[in-house]
Image (spheres, rainbow, N blue to C red):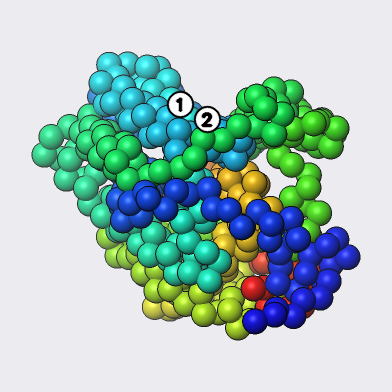
Amino acid sequence: MKRKRHDITGTGITGTGITDERIADTEMSPIDQSGNRVLTMAAVFIATFMTSVEVTIVTTALPSIISSLHGLEYQSWIMSAYMLTTAIATPVFGKLADTVGRRGIFLWGVVIFTVGTLLSGLAPHILLLVLARAIQGIGAGSVMPLTFTIIADLYDYSRRANVLALNNTAWGLSALVGPLIGGFLVDRLSWHWVFFINVPLGVIVTLLILLGYREPTRASRNGHLSLDAPGILWLGTALVALLLGIQMLVRRPFVAVPLIVAAILSSVMLHRRERSADDPLIAPEMFRNPTFGIQILTTTLLSGVLISYQSYFPIWLQSLYRVDSIQAGLVVTSSSVMWLAASLLVGRIIARMVPRTVTLWLTGSLTVTYLTLTIASPHFPIWAFYVIAMLNGTVMGIVISMNTVLSQHLVPKRYVGSATSILTLGRSLGQTVMTGSYGTALTLIIRANLHGIPFSVANETISSGTATAHDPVVDSAILNGSHGVFSIVVVIMLVMMVLNLRDPNRSVVR
């Protein structure tokens, strides 16, 4: 059956969303079909759970870790070291996966992650724990994007969305059981077991990949392995400066501002380097299709929105409504459940609808709900937070899953690993950058509305949701701060809608 095609972008992208080069690329699959797909997908599922549960389970154990290792001064680095090395490693391993193959890079990532996990559990000092977490992050920078890339290799475009949705259940499961497992291990054993529990999972993934995943050996286009060292240097400098600057924005603004400026300058140098490099770390060719770039930006912005309700709905409910932490945490749980359910619909949606239309309708409805939070009174109903969280989960499950599938589909086959790693990096950066931005906004607005009351009183109010005696001035300041946070979210949503309005694709992508 002959497929009808027409140019939609002026860049060689056809109505099917595939370049002629992409069509040629798909004639030969990189996967040796003699490999066991079931074993490979089991490895991918466990690896997804292993890396995603690491965040939720460690967060639960942080107070115990800090107390045991006397590391309050360095407590933020327990998470920051992991995020920094993950962010830097993600595009590097994505490039290597496209150059030398998925199997070896994925195995190395699992091994590095597992070794870092073991060392974290054995760490006798907070600085050694931070170092071990950095090693863990390097491994995660390989494992997380390559789970999506391997799925793209194993399944064609028409089936990929459904398989990604099923793999998302590992992420959802980690969000649900991670805090429970972390609390149980800390209470019954010790914080060390929060890390040790992932070691056998890493061994299982390694064995499954060795037994079930087959892939032909690859070589770089120049006949030898080449790495864009200047590109890696500029990318690493930009990411380290940006993430450190965001963290220091409130407490040390005079240090944070130069760091953020350095991040911007490094990003400019990275852009210039990649345009002139023979074998760039991040190939500019991928961004010649504007629809691809819009998928990356949409995911980055939505990830920033994601962290807003995950972090600030519980704070709002605990500090102003005096609910306990379990009830407040159920708000985030309801979002995770809807995310999983909605992602199962993505395959049918993208087969019938134009991506920009889907994104605009869904993000438009979500923007309206966030507008209500910018003016919510102290009597805003608690049940409304659950409804908004569930709508968030639905929108995220559809749009981010759609972004993942399309970003892999709209590039030549040889760039699938790089495209997936850039999308993964965007998700990490969106959450990390906006976490710092929301925290800065909340702190500044609360300070401006305390009218002489010490900030420590507001801090205590936020930290003790079960307290009965609250100052109405402090409550009002926290409410105004929450309004400010979600005003930023509304701006992000509007920017995202404008970006998608500019998407030149008006056809269903096939």
**Left or right: 30 with respect to 231?**
left
Going by the numbered disc 1, the residue's amino acid type is Ala
**Residue lying at 26% horizontally and 55% vertically, measured from the top left:** 177
Q: Quadrant of residue 370?
A: bottom right
Say if residue 404 shows up in the picture. Answer: yes
Say if residue 460 shows up in the picture. Answer: no
**Residue lying at 74% horizontally and 42% vertically, measured from the top left:** 283
Would you place residue 168 above or below residue 427 in this image? below
* Residue 180 percent location from the top left of the image: 22, 51
- CB atoms of marks 2 and 1 within 8 Å: yes
Q: Earlier in the sequence, mark 2 or mark 1?
A: 2
Depth check: 182 or 156 in front?
A: 156
* Residue 348 percent location from the top left of the image: 52, 80
* Residue 134 percent location from the top left of the image: 45, 26
**Left or right: 443 with respect to 501?**
left
Local packing at callout 1 (Cα closer than 10 Å; few below 14, some 14-19, many 20+) is: many
Q: Residue furthest left?
A: 188
Residue designated by label 1: 134
**Left or right: 273 with respect to 239?**
right
How far apart, in angstroms, are the residues tagged by discs 2 and 1?
6 Å
Local packing at callout 2 (Cα closer than 10 Å; few below 14, some 14-19, many 20+) is: many
